[in-house]
């Protein structure tokens, strides 16, 4: 079994299994504006539209 195939078979619905608390909005560490949670990627992350800073959650 190849790991890259396993990744492709998991749709974004896999994120529902995450049981840690994920805030919808956090404060940007760079410009202190509001970062919005984006979950359309393989893993959830935050993106600041003000300074274009991106932060990916790893777990
Ligand atoms: Zn920012």
Image (cartoon, rainbow, N blue to C red):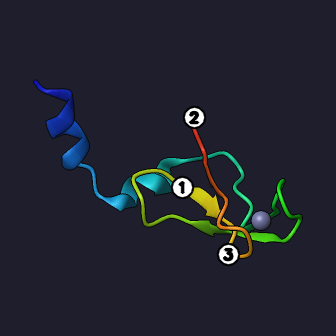
Q: Are marks 1 and 3 in contact (CB under 8 Å)?
A: no
Q: Residues within 10 Å of mark 3 (few under 14, many from 20)?
A: few
Q: Nearer the viewer, mark 1 or mark 3?
A: 3
Q: Position of residue 15 (x, y in %)?
A: 46, 54
Going by the picture, which residue comes out furthest to the right? 32
Q: Which mark is residue 44?
A: 1
Q: Which residue lies at the image location 74% right of the left edge and 75% below the top edge?
A: 50
Q: Residues within 10 Å of mark 1 (few under 14, many from 20)?
A: some
Q: Position of residue 54 (x, y in %)?
A: 62, 57
Q: Secondary structure at mark 2?
A: loop
Q: Position of residue 19 (x, y in %)?
A: 61, 46
Answer with the quarter of the image where residue 49 lies: bottom right
Going by the picture, which residue comes out furthest to the left? 1
Q: Residues within 10 Å of mark 2 (few under 14, many from 20)?
A: few
Ligand 1 position by quadrant = bottom right
The residues tagged by marks 3 and 2 sit, at their Cα atoms, a distance apart of 24 Å
Q: Position of residue 31 (x, y in %)?
A: 86, 64
Going by the picture, which residue comes out furthest to the bottom? 49
**Tally of numbered tags:** 3
Q: Secondary structure at mark 1?
A: loop
In the image, residue 41 sits, relative to residue 24, either above or below, namely: above
In the image, residue 54 sits, relative to residue 8, either above or below, namely: below
Going by the picture, which residue comes out furthest to the front? 51
Q: Which mark is residue 49?
A: 3
Residue placed most toward the observer, 47 or 17: 47
Q: Which residue lies at the image location 85% right of the left edge and 71% below the top edge?
A: 33
Q: Which mark is residue 59?
A: 2
The residues tagged by marks 2 and 1 sit, at their Cα atoms, a distance apart of 10 Å
Instruction: Kindly tell me whether mark 3's CB lies below 8 Å from ligand 1.
Output: yes
């Amino acid at each position: 079994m190849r790991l890259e195939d396993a990744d492709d078979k998991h749709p974004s619905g896999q994120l529902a299994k995450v049981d840690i608390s994920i805030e919808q909005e956090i404060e940007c560490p760079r410009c202190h504006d509001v970062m919005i949670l984006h979950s359309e990627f393989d893993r959830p992350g935050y993106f600041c539209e003000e300074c274009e800073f991106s932060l990916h959650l790893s777990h």
